[in-house]
Amino acid sequence: MVRQEFRQYMQGRVREAIGGSEALEREWKAIRRGWYLGGASFREEMVEQIEEKIGGKKRDSYSGEGVKGHDEKAARALLAKGMGALKTDIEEVKSWKTTDVRKQALTWLIRSSTLASGEWISVQLGMGHRSNISRAMRRIQDASGSVELTLKRKMLQYKD
């Protein structure tokens, strides 16, 4: 019971300190819920340190916002390489249909090489619903046509 009373006391003190301001409440929420406290450069430094720590280790043993940031950083790097190979940019990729084999090859590259979420991939590439990602994965994984095979070989250059 003592802990609960102390928590209530401290919550009251925090409310007094922030004066009920919504902006300050959002800041406190970020402090309570966030995985780091600092600016963008500090965040990048932390993501790099996470990369060093989990590199070569079993990825499933780690979780949280820091690892998610690392996954997205790796996915962005692969996306850039894949777009370079296709001589295109993100705006053009987003304009392609979800059934475009080039877009599906980029999706396959990112999804099969990183643990970036399907939601992240869908938003970045303009894939629409998540089910389009699994269709793209199957099409490239089971590549039988010459176009699919050529793109798969091109993307394989960038896989780990």
Image (tube, grey):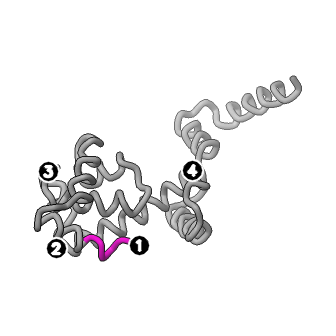
Return the residue at label 3. 99
Identify which residue is drawn at 57% across, 34% down: 21
Q: CA distance from mark 1 to mark 4?
A: 23 Å
Q: Which residue is mark 2?
A: 87
Task: Report if residue 36 is visible in the image.
Answer: no
Whether 157 is among the magenta residues is yes
Going from N to C along the chain, the mark reached first, 2 or 4, is 4
Identify the image quadrant of residue 14: top right
Q: Residues within 10 Å of mark 4 (few under 14, many from 20)?
A: few
In front here: 156 or 119?
A: 156
Q: Which mark is residue 160?
A: 1
- Identified by mark 4, the residue type is Gly
Looking at the image, which residue is at 14% across and 51% down?
99
Q: What kind of residue is marked 3?
A: Thr
Residue 133 magenta-highlighted: no
Q: Main secondary structure of the magenta part?
A: loop
